[in-house]
Image (tube, grey):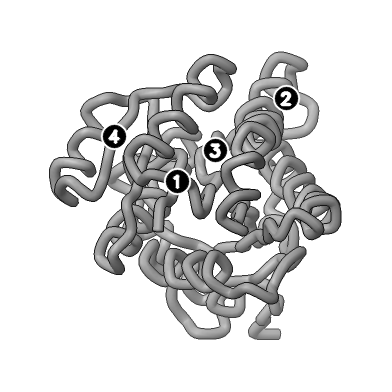
């Protein structure tokens, strides 16, 4: 199996790459930070190919698909994982910030998926988007991120309907809290605050803990290989979307 994972230099993307390689796949990963993606590829061996690329760049998107097909001999699945997060009050939005959020989190996914269609048509392949339980629970200050993730849920259903006749399945996973660099890059927390922050969030989950990238990767793998599942937004969230309360 040949799989392309965007944003594969850290977090859920890195966990996906490791999980897929360990289960026999040829994996191509990308990221803007050369040292990150090449470090992951070196760790995982020859089954993982690293490409330095920005998913918001049209020429880089073409390069990514070509590299993945060359590495794996075909393309069975595209995992649209690369994303940005912004946390700020509504009154502090700027148009440029919102455009960047949608360009990275939504438009790049749509365009990359479009380029992948001819190859996925050949393999009866799968597209997976990474949503978020930010669409299930309201976190003040996170509306740019939540809005883009909500867009991906709508996109999942329409693309699943449109691409079904081509035997291409389109699904979305909605992770709960997983320790990644996303909140650090967004400036939500400092590195010294990571453990305390995630410990405080753990109690919001019905299962009492945050998740791991591997647990999300397992669910993505299920959606890639399940041949009669399409148009689904799967909550992989330890129950945070249930709105568990101590009241």
Whole-percent x, y for residue 125 in the image: 58, 57
Q: CA distance from mark 2 to mark 3?
A: 13 Å
Q: CA distance from mark 4 to mark 3?
A: 18 Å
Whole-percent x, y for residue 94 in the image: 74, 17
Circle 4 crowding by C-alpha within 10 Å: few under 14, some 14–19, many from 20: many
Whole-percent x, y for residue 70 in the image: 36, 35
Q: Which mark is residue 74?
A: 1
Helix, strand or loop at mark 1? loop
Q: CA distance from mark 2 to mark 1?
A: 35 Å
Residue under numbered circle 2: 98
Looking at marks 4 and 3 on the same chain, the residue that comes earlier in the sequence is marked by: 4
Helix, strand or loop at mark 4? strand
Number of the front mark, 4 or 3: 4
Q: Which mark is residue 83?
A: 3
Left or right: 73, with 128 as reference point: left
Q: CA distance from mark 1 to mark 4?
A: 16 Å
Q: Which mark is residue 50?
A: 4
Q: Quadrant of the N terminus?
A: bottom left
Helix, strand or loop at mark 3? loop
Compare residues 187 and 17 and report the one nearer the observer. Answer: 17
Whole-percent x, y for residue 88 in the image: 65, 33
Circle 1 crowding by C-alpha within 10 Å: few under 14, some 14–19, many from 20: some
């Amino acid at each position: 199996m040949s799989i392309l994972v965007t944003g594969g230099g850290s977090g859920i993307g890195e966990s996906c790459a490791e999980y897929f390689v360990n289960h026999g796949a040829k994996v191509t990963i990308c990221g803007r930070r050369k040292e990150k993606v090449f470090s992951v590829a070196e760790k995982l061996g020859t089954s993982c190919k690293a490409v330095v690329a920005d998913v918001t760049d049209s020429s880089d998107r073409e390069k990514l698909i070509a590299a993945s097909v060359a590495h794996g001999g075909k393309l069975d699945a595209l995992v649209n994982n690369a994303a940005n997060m912004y946390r700020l009050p509504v009154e502090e939005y700027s148009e440029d910030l919102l455009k960047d959020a949608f360009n990275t989190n939504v438009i790049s996914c749509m365009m990359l998926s479009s380029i992948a269609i001819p190859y996925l048509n050949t393999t009866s392949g799968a597209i997976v988007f990474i949503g978020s339980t930010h669409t299930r629970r309201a976190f003040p200050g996170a509306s740019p991120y939540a809005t883009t993730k909500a867009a991906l849920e709508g996109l999942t259903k329409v693309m699943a309907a449109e691409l079904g006749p081509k035997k291409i399945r389109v699904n979305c996973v909605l992770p709960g809290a997983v320790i990644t660099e996303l909140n650090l890059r967004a400036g939500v927390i400092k590195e010294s605050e990571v453990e305390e922050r995630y410990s405080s969030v753990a109690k919001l989950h019905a299962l009492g803990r945050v998740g791991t990238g591997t647990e999300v990767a397992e669910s993505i793998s299920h959606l890639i290989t399940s041949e009669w599942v399409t148009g689904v937004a799967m909550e992989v969230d330890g129950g945070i979307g249930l709105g568990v309360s101590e009241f």
